[in-house]
Image (cartoon, rainbow, N blue to C red):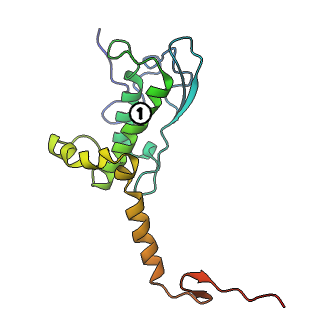
Amino acid sequence: MVIKPAFSANSSAPASKECRRAQWLLSPYELSEWIVRDSHAGAIELKLSFRLRMPDGRCLTEWKDFYAAVKEFAFFYRDERYSQVNDAEVHVAAVRSLMAICHGLALDGFRSFKNVTANVIKGLLPRIVLGNEGLYNASTRLSKWLKSREKRKRPGFKLGLPLRSRPN
């Protein structure tokens, strides 16, 4: 069986709507937010949003190459020809992990997986081990932003706190 890619090289739009349907996928493939369910009895339904905020403030959905790769992974991760994942929670967790890796790679200047080598992944491993905090580097970035704000003098503030007059 030949598998057609869902995205063409020049577009982030799926190659064919018919080629990306599955019983566990309750939403159209094209949407940026899916509802997925368990394959066994379908008792659990979860929302999987691809609208992760990236380092530049845009959503993953606006990063054409990463978005296409994550969506294909999300779809084929449940394909019985390649895996035996039937659980919606495992599926959503795996896709969110890949989105966090995309965020970490974007912080390092990558815009796609095209130039990601084994050495790049080895360099990313210490951050992957730290989980989302390591990949998002949020505490360091937030601390840096707060320090930049502290340096500004603002009237009506003392040591970073607003001064308020007491009512008489």
Reply above or below: 81 against 130: above
Residue 75 x, y percent position in the rendering: 41, 24
Q: Amino acid at mark 1?
A: Val
Q: Is residue 111 visible?
A: no
167 sits to left or right of 73 = right
Q: Which residue is depicted at the point 56% across and 25% down?
A: 27
Q: Is residue 149 visible?
A: yes
Reply above or below: 142 against 155: above
Q: Quadrant of the C terminus?
A: bottom right
Residue 124 x, y percent position in the rendering: 25, 47
Residue 142 x, y percent position in the rendering: 44, 65
Q: Quadrant of the N terminus?
A: top left
131 sits to left or right of 51 = left
* Residue bearing the label numbered 1: 95
Q: Which residue is depicted at the point 43% across and 45% down?
A: 60
Residue 14 x, y percent position in the rendering: 42, 28
Reply above or below: 38 against 35: above
